[in-house]
Image (cartoon, rainbow, N blue to C red):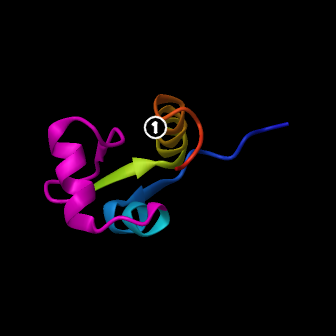
Amino acid sequence: MHNAPDRVITIKEVASRIGLSVITLQRLIRTGDGPPVTKLSTRRHGVSESHLERWLDSRLDHQGGAAA
């Protein structure tokens, strides 16, 4: 079985999926606390869906796996 290639989504789409503003997500990325980004062009960045999932999992693990 062949896996589909990992899709890269825009910062705006990432922010929408995780319920943050674009500005807050960009701040997390800038400080090293956000998901790893891929430079697509001079002014365009994205996040692979697999990296986003791993980042979210690590955030949940770090917080004990449950929301307060």
**In the rendered image of this protein, does residue 29 appear above or below residue 10?**
above
Q: From what the image shows, is residue 12 above or below residue 4?
A: below
Residue type at numbered disc 1: Arg
- Which sits in the foreground, 2 or 32? 32
**Residue toward you, 43 or 50:** 50
Closer to the camera in the image, 45 or 5: 45
Residue at the spot 54% in from the left edge and 49% down from the top edge: 67
- Residue 34 percent coordinates (x, y): 31, 43
Give the farthest residue toward the front: 68
Circle 1 residue: 59
Expressed as whole percent of the image width and height from the top left, the position of residue 55 reads 46, 38
What's the residue at 41%, 60% (across, down)? Answer: 14
Quadrant, the N terminus: top right
Residue 27 % position (x, y): 17, 52
* Labels in figure, total: 1
Q: Classify residue 7 as left or right of residue 15.
A: right
**Residue at 43% across / 66% down in the picture?**
19
Apparent side of residue 10 relative to residue 66 in the rendered image (left or right): left
Residue 43 belongs to magenta span: yes
Asked where in the image residue 57 lies, by quadrant, the reply is top right
Q: Residue furthest right?
A: 1
Q: Nearer the viewer, residue 14 or 66?
A: 66
15 left or right, relative to 52: left
Q: Secondary structure at mark 1?
A: helix
Crowd class of label 1 (few under 14; some 14 to 19; many from 20; radius 10 Å): some
Q: Is residue 63 above or below residue 44?
A: above
Vertical position of residue 35 compared to residue 18: above or below: above
Which range of residues does the magenta coloring cover? 18-44
Where's residue 51, x and y in %?
A: 47, 39
Q: Check if residue 58 falls in the magenta segment.
A: no
